[in-house]
Image: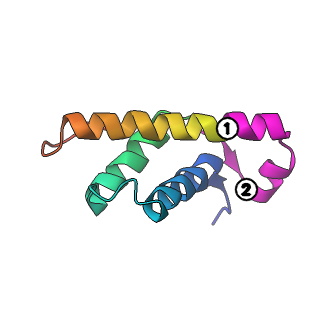
Amino acid sequence: MLNIVNYYEQLVIDELWMMAIKHTNDNLSHDDIEDIACLALNNLPASYVKSAFDKASHLSETDYQHTTDRVKHAINDAIKKIGKHPHMVREL
C-alpha cells in the first residue's frame, strides 16, 4: 500500500477540532461536521504528499498562513452551505 495523504485533510481536521475546542460548532451534529469536512476538501486543491511534515517544512511562513487561511475559508463556506440546507440530503 502506498503511504500518501492529501495534505489538506489533516489541516481541515485540525481546524474543525480547534473549532470544537472553542465551541464554535456546538450546534452541528457529527454528520454535519463530516459533511463540512467533505465540502471543504472538495473546494481545496488536492495536494498529495508522502509526508505532511515534509510539505510543511518546505513552506514559507507566508505560504503556510495562506494555506491555513484557505482552509478556514473553505470550512466557513461549507458551514454556510450546511446552514442553508440543515435537514436535506446534500449534494457533495
Taking the spot 13% from the left edge, 46% from the top edge, the residue there is: 87
| Residue 45 can be seen, yes or no | no
Give the colour scheme of this rendering: rainbow
Q: Under tag 1, what secondary structure?
A: helix
Q: Position of residue 9 (x, y in %)?
A: 56, 52
Q: Which residues are magenta?
A: 46-66
39 or 49: nearer the viewer: 39
Taking the spot 28% from the left edge, 53% from the top edge, the residue there is: 32
Side of 92 relative to 45 (left or right): left
Task: Give the total number of marks visible in the rendering.
Answer: 2
Q: Which mark is residue 67?
A: 1
3 or 80: nearer the viewer: 80
Side of 24 relative to 44 (left or right): left
Residue 15 on the magenta span? no
| Residue 18 can be seen, yes or no | yes
Real-space Cα separation, disc 1 to disc 2, in angstroms:
13 Å
Quarter of the figure with residue 51? bottom right
Q: Given this view, does label 1 or label 2 mark the residue nearer the observer?
A: 1
Asked if 44 appears above or below 53 in the picture, the reply is: above
Q: Residue furthest left?
A: 87
Asked if 46 appears above or below 20 in the picture, the reply is: above
Q: Which mark is residue 52?
A: 2
Side of 63 relative to 2 (left or right): right
Amino acid at pointer 2? Ala
Q: Under tag 2, what secondary structure?
A: helix
Amino acid at pointer 1? Thr
